[in-house]
Image (cartoon, rainbow, N blue to C red):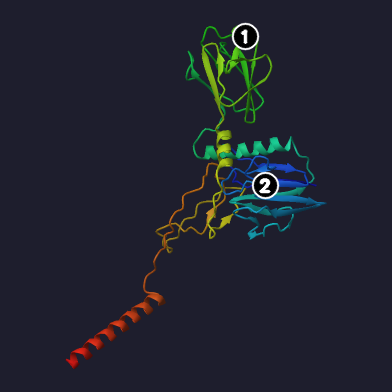
Amino acid sequence: MALTIVVMAPAGAGKEGGGELSLTLDAPRIILGRAEGCEVRLPDATVSPRHASIRQRGATYLLLDEGSDNGTYLGKTRIAPRTAMPLRTGDRIRVGRVWLALRIEPAVPKGAPAAAAKELALELVARGLAAQGEDPTPRVLVVDGPDRGRALLLPESARPYFVGRAKDTDLSLDDPDVSRRHVTITRRGDQFSVQDLGSRAGASLDGAPVPQFDTIWRPGQVLAISADRLVFEHPAAEALAEIERCPCEPLRPDAVYEPPSVEEPAAPSTPTPSTPTPSTPTPSSASASTLSPLSRPAASVPRVVQGGGGWGFTEALIALLALGVLALSIAGLMWLLGRG
């Protein structure tokens, strides 16, 4: 039996039509966390680098907390560190503020586990960026030369994109020294590669000639095609690296994180006329419907304590003590005046 781990996010979050974000794994130990190297990489600042693990014992899967900062929950019950809890199909677990649903089923894992984990993390970050109004699409930019300002988007992984002077190329350049089909650029996950297509003038990466086979194009390297200079950007990969470097964000101990509905987004609650709307939001509950891929440890915010109407017991007791002291002071003064 394999284990399918589904990241619970509402339908329609990020990409059009939503779509399940999941990994199917069949391994004796599965690490859940924020760090590179985890079998399930969850890009959220409230998730510890190595947060929890799921271990296989025969046909049984066991959940353990790995000493995380914000705890691991089976349903709404926090499990003690280093304590194994058996899992069943349909269970929901929470790491940080991220909810996961589990399916134990006969299934075959697809692809290499490390590549699948990175692909899931990049997709989660991309959806988060899109939800914040940013375009997460990987791109190549012409930063200098006759075609400065032109850009090529690379939404499809493993597809070769053609660059050259021909009008039917994916990125058409006007430089007359550029061949009709000069190079191809391919993206696989967060990795870019470039290949020379036998061009007249050739191409180079930081001065090194580009051969006529796929060559890794590393972050920060400049691709020279005649007089044009090109660089690439991968917003989701850059954001993922930033999230993995940041310290763990502590969760409020009084916060309640409900699992999101994966069928349809929850409708916003509207206060009824008979219920007054509070002047400040209640911090005792929070939504885990979407990941916060760009969340960083927030600065501590002073808690606002709302006062109620009328005096409580403590205030009344203090007032009575003050009146007693005042009465004794007046009595003492009268005694002194009587003696005089």
Q: Residue furthest right?
A: 58
Residue picked out by circle 2: 32
Q: Position of residue 184 (x, y in %)?
A: 63, 17
Which mark is drawn over residue 199?
1
For the residues bearing labels 2 and 1, Cβ distance under 8 angstroms: no
- Of 198 and 17, which appears nearest the observer? 198
Q: Is 300 displayed left or right of 35 in the figure?
A: left
Q: Is 54 displayed left or right of 8 in the figure?
A: right
Q: Amino acid type of disc 2?
A: Leu
Q: Residues within 10 Å of mark 2 (few under 14, many from 20)?
A: many
Q: Position of residue 339 (x, y in %)?
A: 19, 93
- Res. 25 image quadrant: top right
Q: Which residue is painted at 54% across and 19% down in the image?
A: 230
- Res. 225 image quadrant: top right
Check the image and report above or below for 332 versus 262. below
Q: Position of residue 143 (x, y in %)?
A: 49, 20
